[in-house]
Amino acid sequence: MLTVYHLQRSQSERIVWLCEELGIPYELKIYARDPQTLLAPTEYKKLHPMGSAPVITDGSVTLAESCAITEYILTKYGGSALRLSPDVPNYASYLYWLHFANGSLQPAVSRLMLLKYGGITPENPFYGRLDAGRKASLKMMDEHLQKNKWLAGEEFTAADVMCVFSLTTMRLFLPFGLEEYPGLVAWLGRCGDREGYKRAMAKGDPGFTPALGVEAPESIVRGATRG
């Protein structure tokens, strides 16, 4: 049976959401972060050599990496749901945004987080260059979503599932607002209204309120400030 190993407040929320949207049977195993360090517990790190979330098992298969897991589940269990076929005009757009999530967007945010908690301030020129990349990613997404309901066009797909984390839960680690990006905010609202998303967050992170709003959320990292 497909088993999803979910580390709370992590990218593995995508996989729980994907399974809920598809309506497929799966077993959910939840792991809490260490309350002091916010790192994954030792038992989670033992699941895969990389020691990071997400991880799934399916029979003899153990797989990590969000996009690899997403493609695996879609291909094996999803049928034609949540993805576009190559003969559809928006296929290239679907493929781009699916991989943009962890190829460009998530690194743009996580690199800044590492700099900030390493003591590098926004006044540092290197920080500024990286922050310009984050803003460019958000601007591009915003302009696209002002013209399209979903990232791949009029149809909700796994590309949307992949991109939401970096602009919601990830902002708890590097708080930033979305005041300049109305298209993004409206899209996040649509994603947050989906029953699959609500079920996934309720199952995987009970009591957690997703950071779907415009304002920068409170950081969960000790000593952090909003950026």
Image (cartoon, rainbow, N blue to C red):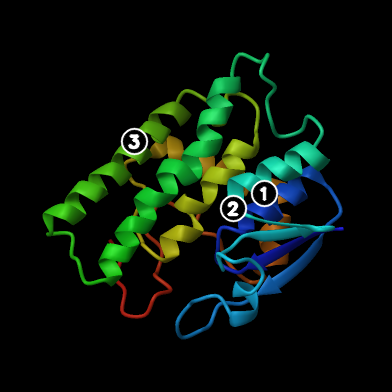
What amino acid does circle 3 point to? Lys
Q: Is residue 145 visible?
A: yes
Decide which of 107, 180 is in the foreground and name it. Answer: 107
Q: Position of residue 49 (x, y in %)?
A: 59, 66
What amino acid does circle 1 point to? Ile
Q: Which residue is mark 2?
A: 65
Q: Position of residue 72 (x, y in %)?
A: 72, 43
Q: Secondary structure at mark 1?
A: helix
Per the model, the C-alpha gap separating discs 1 and 2 is 6 Å
Is tag 1's residue or tag 3's residue first in the polypeptide sequence? Answer: 1
Up-down relation of residue 169 to residue 162 (above or below): below
Residue at 42 percent across and 34 percent down: it is 141
Tell me the quadrant of the picture where the C terminus can be found.
bottom left
Q: Are marks 3 and 2 in contact (CB under 8 Å)?
A: no
Q: Which residue is mark 1?
A: 69
Decide which of 58, 143 is in the foreground and name it. Answer: 58
Q: Are marks 1 and 2 in contact (CB under 8 Å)?
A: yes
